[in-house]
Amino acid sequence: MNIGIIGAGAIATYVVEAIAGNPSWNMHVQSIYVRDRKKYADFATKNNIVLYQDIDAFLDSDIDMVVEAANIEAVETLLPVIVQKKSVVIISIGVFVDQAFLTNMKEEAKKYDNKIYLPSGAIGGLDIIQHAQKTNTLSTVTLETRKPAHTLTNERVDTEQVVFHGTAEQAIKEFPKNINVAIALGLAGVGMKDTEVKIIADSTVERNHHTIVAEGTFGKASFQIENASLPSNANTSYLAAMSVVGTLQKTNEYIQIG
């Protein structure tokens, strides 16, 4: 499978290097769409990748799947074009807090017979939550996210401080770069308006901690995730980067778990 990536930051770099280091996966990053070709010229040469600044030329290159590794604004602009030609893995899923955009992209994907894949990102347990929702046995989903204080506020925090308590829909608007996990939960479960989110700035932790609780007639499930950062970028979750590669691999598998 030939892959094209939008963006060339930490996650894109991880995907390129992970795939290059595992030839048995039968995947190759062929093309990357960027705004500044000069900035990434050496990286492209090192990894035998062609850089593009024109989205149509990028999509018409020899790629089977697109990975978005940029930001919400890029998804808003480019996804309507991408989904007409290719299936795509979306990292910046906060864009789907806009219900009209989500509905439109579903319709476009169906019209052009392409898929939009949303990796689990920095959390887990979405299979249980999604199965419970599909069978009408899910009642509530809550998320408590605890992050190093300096990543959430410029104020001094001696121990911990609740910086947000509300819905997933509200959370992504106030913390667009910090709480994509809430959108993943909302999409998989009871919806973004009914998924309860609490965000805590904690001066005593060095990693991001997520605690998820889902309840319904099926029973109760709880998950705790502690995210290490990518060695190359302290602001990027290792698990989130891994989930992109895992999603790409699953699209090619004939037996799928979960």
Image (spheres, rainbow, N blue to C red):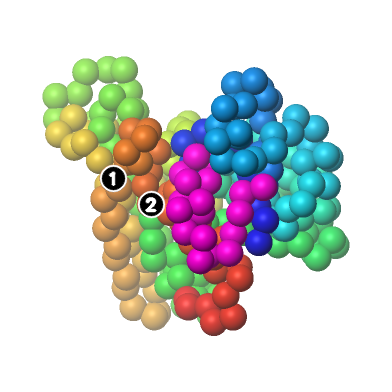
Question: Would residue 14 be counted in the magenta stretch?
Answer: yes
Going from N to C along the chain, the mark reached first, 2 or 1, is 1
Give the spatial CA distance, label 2 vs label 1: 7 Å
Residue 195 horizontal side relative to residue 55, left or right:
left
User: Do labels 2 and 1 touch, CB within 8 Å?
Assistant: yes
Against 14, residue 248 (above or below) is: below
Q: Which residues are magenta?
A: 12-30
Query: What is the x, y in percent for residue 171?
Result: 46, 39
Residue 181 horizontal side relative to residue 42, left or right:
left
Q: Tell which of 90 and 137 is nearer to you.
A: 90
Q: Is residue 140 visible?
A: no
Query: What is the x, y in percent for residue 239?
Result: 38, 52
What residue is pinned by disc 1? 228
Residue 59 horizontal side relative to residue 250, left or right:
right
What residue is pinned by disc 2? 239
Q: Residue at x 58, y 64 (%)?
A: 26
What element does badge 1 sit on?
loop
Q: Residue at x 67, y 30 (%)?
A: 34
Question: Would residue 125 be counted in the magenta stretch?
Answer: no
Prevalent SS, magenta region: helix
Quarter of the image where the N terminus is located: bottom right
